[in-house]
Each structure stands twice: as C-alpha cells, then as structure tokens.
Amino acid sequence: MGVLRVRWMVMYANSGEITSVRFMDVPETAKYLNVSISWLYKNAARSGLAIYRFGTGPNAKIRFKVSEVEAWVKQQRMMGG
C-alpha cells in the first residue's frame, strides 16, 4: 500500500504514561484505502470505520485513527475458495 504519511497525532496522559495516537484526514485515508473521498464520506460509518470529529460546526475536522483503519483493512480480506 505504499508509505503512510501521518500528519495528525494526539498525545494524552494515561496513568502517568504519555501515549500517542496517530490519525489521518479524509483525503489521506481515501488514498490509503484506494477509494474516493465521496465514498469515504458516504460509507465509512456503515462499513465499520470509526470516524473521529475534532471540533464542532462547519470547521470540525474529520479524522480516522490509523490503527483502526489498518485493522479494518485486515478484516476486509476475503477468505475462501
């Protein structure tokens, strides 16, 4: 799938330990999944991809957690004959 560039990272403290979580924006996620941006907006939630919204109103930012997108891709693999 190529190189994954991640521009968004959220860090938080959990029990005194700092943890980082990597996020991709909509165009990055669409490119990674090889789908259109419109497909991602229409089908992400119903396909099982978790959507994270940062902010409110028209300026809210939609992001996808990298680890969850990668896990979703693995779940989509078709098994069979």
Image (cartoon, helix red, strand yellow):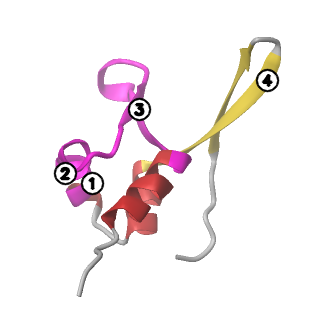
Q: Residue at x 52, y 76 (%)?
A: 1
- Judged from this view, the residue extending furthest toward the right is 16
Instruction: Identify the magenta region.
Output: 39-67
Q: CA distance from mark 3 to mark 2?
A: 14 Å
The reply to whether dot 1 and dot 2 touch (C-beta < 8 Å) is yes
Q: Which mark is residue 18?
A: 4
> In the figure, is residue 21 to the left or right of 74?
right
Mark 3 crowdedness (10 Å alpha carbons): few <14, some 14-19, many ≥20 = some
Task: Report whether 34 appears left or right of 17.
Answer: left
Measured in 3D between alpha carbons, the distance from the residue under mark 3 to the one under mark 4, in whole angstroms, is: 20 Å
Position of residue 47 relative to residue 8, above or below, is below
Asked whether disc 1 touches disc 3, contact meaning CB atoms under 8 Å apart, the reply is no
Nearer-N-terminus badge (3/4)? 4
Residue holding disc 1:
40
- Marks 4 and 2: CB-CB under 8 Å? no
What residue lies at 27% left-to-right and 45% top-to-bottom?
48
Three-letter amino acid code of the residue under disc 4: Ile
Question: Helix or strand or loop: what does disc 4 sit on?
Answer: strand
